[in-house]
Amino acid sequence: MSNSASTLFDKVWDAHVVRKIEDGPDVFLIDRHFIHEVTSPVAFLGLETRGISVLYPERTFATADHNTPTINQHLPVEDPLSANQLKALETNTAKYGISHWGLGDPKNGIVHVVGPENGITLPGMTIVCGDSHTSTHGAFGAIAFGIGTSEVEMVLSSQCIMQPKPKKMRITINGALGKGVTPKDVALFIISQITASGATGYFVEYAGEVFENMSMEGRMTVCNLSIEMGARGGMIAPDQTTFNYLEGRELAPKGEAWENALAYWKTLKTDEGATFDYELTYDASQIEPQITYGTNPGLGTGITQKIPTASAVKDGEASYKKSLNYMGFAENEEIIGKQVDYVFLGSCTNGRIEDFRAFASIVKGRKKADNITAWLVPGSHIVEAQIKEEGILDILTEAGFLLRQPGCSACLAMNDDKIPAGKYAVSTSNRNFEGRQGPGSRTLLASPLVAAAAAVTGVVTDPRELL
Amino acid sequence: MLKAQSQSEMAYDKFQILTSTAIPLPLENVDTDQIIPARFLKATKREGFGDNLFRDWRYNGDDSLKQDFVLNNPTYSGKILVGGRNFGSGSSREHAAWAIYDYGFRCVVSSFFADIFKGNALNIGILPVQVSPEFLDKIFQAIEADPKAELVVDLPAQTISIAATGESESFAINGYKKHNMLNGFDDIDYLQAMKEEIKTFAEKSLY
Ligand code: SF4
C-alpha cells in the first residue's frame, strides 16, 4: 500500500473538515441540505428560541413529501396536523429565503428523488437531510446521510454538523446479474447476508462490475438501502454513467463550470492500494430475486427459498419468533404462493422511472388480480410526467391499475395510505418494521418486478416466470 | 478548545451520576418506528412525545393498555431503559429520542446502538451506554431477580454497575461529548462560537 493511496470516501470527507476536535467529532461542512415538513419545524423553532438565523439559505432545499396526500393534491389537505406541518414548512422557508417545492409545485416529490433529478446532488458533495435514506445521494459519489432534528438546526445555523468519521467498508460484486435480478435484489441480498446491523459504524463503498454496469436509478436504489444494513451511508465512484445523467439537469453546472467540475469529479475514485477497515466480496451469480419475510430488512431471502429456522438466522431467537409471529408465518414455510392483499410501488427506494418501466414490463398484457389493492406512487412529478410520456400509464391503465400522485405515501404511512392491520403488502419501499405501513400491517419488501408479479397473480410469485 | 464554547444556558439537564431502577426490554433490533410510530410525528413542537412512546406495543387499537408490555407493568420503573442489541435502528427521527426523554428516561443501555439514534440521544441529553453482551445479560438477570435492583451510571468515571452485586463495567464516550453531557451543553453553541472560521472555510469551498 502506498501512503498516498486514499479511498473515495476519505477524499470527500477530508475536504470538508473545518476543524478536528481532539477526542471528539469533526466539525464537518455540509454542501447541500434537504429539508421536509416533518423533521424541520422543531429545528426552525430552535433557531427562534436562540435568536439565530440561517447562515446560507441558498444551500438548503425544501420539499413537502412525507405527509402529503397522493390523490386530489389540488384540494386542501384534510388532516389538520399534516396541513399544519406543510404550512410551517412554507412559512419557515419563506421567512429565511429557502427554496421550497411545496405541494402542487411541478418540482415537488420525494426529497431523495427530486434532489438528483434537478441536478442539486453532485459528485464530491456532502449532503444531509433529516431522513435516514439520504444515503441515496451517495450514488453520485457524494457523502450523504440522514441526521436528527438537532443537526438540522446545526446545518441551518452554521452549515456544519459535528460528526465522528465512520470506518470504511467496501462491498465488491463482480459478474453479471441474472434475468429478473434488479438492484433492489442486490441490496436486499447484501442485507440478508450481513444483517440489519452488519454495517453499523461504517460507510460503505460499492465496487465491481455489477455497480459499474448499473444505471443511476439502480445505484440510487442500492445506496438508499445502505442504511438498512446499519451503515451511515453508501457511495459509488462517479463515472461516465453519472456524468451523462447529470449533464443538462437544471441546477447542475453549465459551460465552463461543467468542464471544471468534470475534471474534479474524475479524480473521485478509490486509489489502487487504498485500504478499508472491512471488505466483503460476492459474486453476482449468487443473487436471485429477493423477498423479506420478517420485520427487519435483514430477514429476507431468495424468493424460491423457505423461511429459515431460528437457528439459521443471526437475530436472537426471541426477536425472530416475535417477528414471524407478527407476520403470521412459520419456520420452513415456502414463501412463493403466500397470500398478498396490497402492492405498493413507490418510495425513494423504487419510485423512479426505471422502477415503473420494470413494473410495466410484467403487467403489460395482463390484468391486476382481483384480490389486490395496488398503490402505484411516482417519486416526483417529473417521474409522473415521464410515465405518461413513455406510454407506461396506458399499459398500467389497460391492466387495471391507477396511478397516484407523488409522495412518500405508504412507505411510512403518515398520510392516508395505510395498509390495514393483518393485511399483507408486497412493497418496493425500504422498511418492513412492525406497523411501518400502518398499524398491524405486514410488509414483504421486494423489487418492482416481484411487486408486479404479485399484483397480477395475487400471490407471491417468482417474476422470472412472467418475463 | 472546549473553552471556546460560549454557554448562555443549558440545553438539557446535566448528567453526572444516575442511580436508578431500570425497565428491561430484552428484544433485539428495537427500531425507531416502534419507539414512536410515524403517525405521531405530526407535531411542530418537541413536547409530549412520551405519551406515544412504544405506542403500538403499549396500547391496543382501542387505546386500552396491553397488559403484557413492560411499560404497563407497575413492577418496573426507573430512569434507565435496558434494550437488546441494535437498539434504535431505522429512521433518523429524533422524535424517538425525544419520546424516550419525555417519558422520563435519562439513559439507555444496550450491547449495540444504531448510529443515528446514538447521536440523536447524545444531542438531547440521553446517555447511551454500550456494554458487553455478557454484562447486558447480567443486568437483565439482576432486574429479573429483583425488579427494584438499582443500576449506577457514573459518567465522570465512565462506569455502569449493578448496585446489589457491585459488578461493574466501563463504557466509552468521547471527551467532547462527555464534557457536553456533564455540563448540559450542546453542539449548536459550539458551532455558533466558531462561525467566522466556518464562513472562511465555506466560502472557498467548491459548492
Ligand atoms: S419514501 Fe420513505 S424512506 Fe423515502 S424519504 Fe419518504 S419516508 Fe423516507
Image: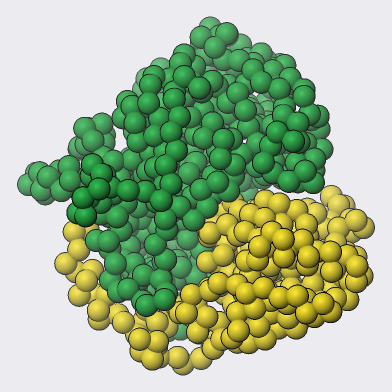
Chain colours: A green, B yellow
Give the image location of residue B22, x and y in percent.
79, 72
Residue at point 60% right, 72% down? B171
What count of labels does the image hold? 0
Q: Residue furthest left?
A: A256
Query: Is B153 situated left or right of B91 in this image?
Result: right
Nearer-the-camera pick, A161 or A87: A161
Q: Is residue B48 visible?
A: no
Q: Residue at x 63, y 70 (%)?
A: B129
In the image, A467 versus A254, the foreground residue is A467
Quadrant of the rendered structure where residue A95 is?
bottom left
Q: Is residue B187 left or right of residue A124?
A: right
Q: Residue at x 58, y 26 (%)?
A: A290
- Image coordinates of residue A216 in percent, x first then y, are 34, 33
* Residue at left offset 57%, top offset 53%: B91
Indicate the quadrant where residue A341 lies. top right
As drawn, A284 above or below B18: above
Q: Position of residue A267 (x, y in %)?
A: 17, 46
Using the image as rendered, state which of residue A161 and residue A22 is in the foreground.
A22
Q: Nearer the viewer, residue B119 or A384?
A: B119
Q: Is residue A195 visible?
A: yes
Residue B19, compared with residue A59, is above or below; it is: below
**Residue A208 point in image, percent of width and height:** 34, 31
Q: Quadrant of residue B24?
A: bottom right
